[in-house]
Image: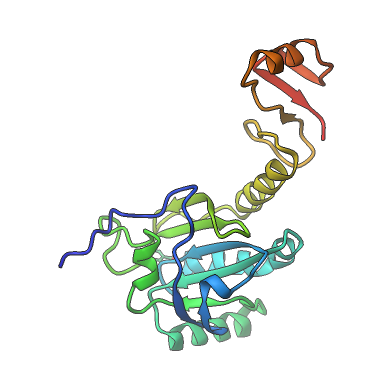
Amino acid sequence: MEENLNVIPRIGDQAPDFTAVTTKGTIKFSDYAKDKWMVLFSHPADFTPVCTTEMSGFAERKGEFDALNTELMGLSIDSIHAHLAWVNNVRKNTGVYFDFPIIADIDMKVSKLYGMLQPNESETAAVRAVFFIDPSKKIRLIMYYPLNVGRNMDEILRVLEGLQISDANKVALPLNWTKGDRVIVPPPSNLEEMQERIDGEYAEKVDFYLVKKDL
Ligand code: BEZ
């Protein structure tokens, strides 16, 4: 039977569970990183230039992900042997160590489950996907990049921290928000809340539906 690659997880869905061979041993996703955020990301292929820069970017900024209570997990449709050789090669050449699990998705099971295999871009390599998964294992944000354009680590960390700040403070974040900027008070959902936005003292107010405050 033909598999339907168009059925892919969406924001708000529970992250599909899987068991996979990784550079840190076999991992059952639902048992991994309990009570933590996860950034699950794919790259097209080991021993390729853009992927090496991206993977190194994740490794070099792992401390910032740790500080945000977040575990990293990479994936590509390569064998565990290729992964091990690549991790070793990059460490030898640059000193950067990929100290997080990388899934060897040689049977494409996980990449299909997560819509990382987009055949009109490549039939054999995963696109550059990033899934932001909260501690309840709900998918909160998804990025997809093509094979020829690398991702932006500042943006990955910005949206991860943004999700956490938004959750913790029940606020929304405006265009180009970065940490320390004013945040948006959620728009009113009833007349009482509308009046409160009109009468309340706020750092910035355009009208009742666009009100900002400092955290
Ligand atoms: C790269 O990472 O450089 C790359 C991988 C697959 C296709 C094109 C570029």
Q: Report the front residue among 151 and 27.
A: 27
Identify the residue shown where x is 57% and y is 86%: 88
Q: Report the front residue among 164 and 104.
A: 164
User: On the picture, is 18 further left or further right than 176?
Assistant: left
Q: Report the front residue among 35 and 56.
A: 35
Q: Which quadrant: the C terminus?
A: top right
Identify the residue shown where x is 61% and y is 48%: 155
* Residue 10 visible in this rendered orientation of the protein: yes
Q: Quadrant of residue 121?
A: bottom left
| Quarter of the render that holds ligand 1 | bottom left
User: On the picture, is 87 further left or further right than 70?
Assistant: left
Identify the residue shown where x is 58% and y is 79%: 90
Residue extending farthest to the left is: 1
Q: Which quadrant: the N terminus?
A: bottom left
Residue 156 location (% of width, % of height):
60, 52
Residue 212 location (% of width, % of height):
74, 24
Residue 107 location (% of width, % of height):
32, 78
Q: Is residue 42 above or below residue 98?
A: above
Identify the residue shown where x is 62% and y is 64%: 57
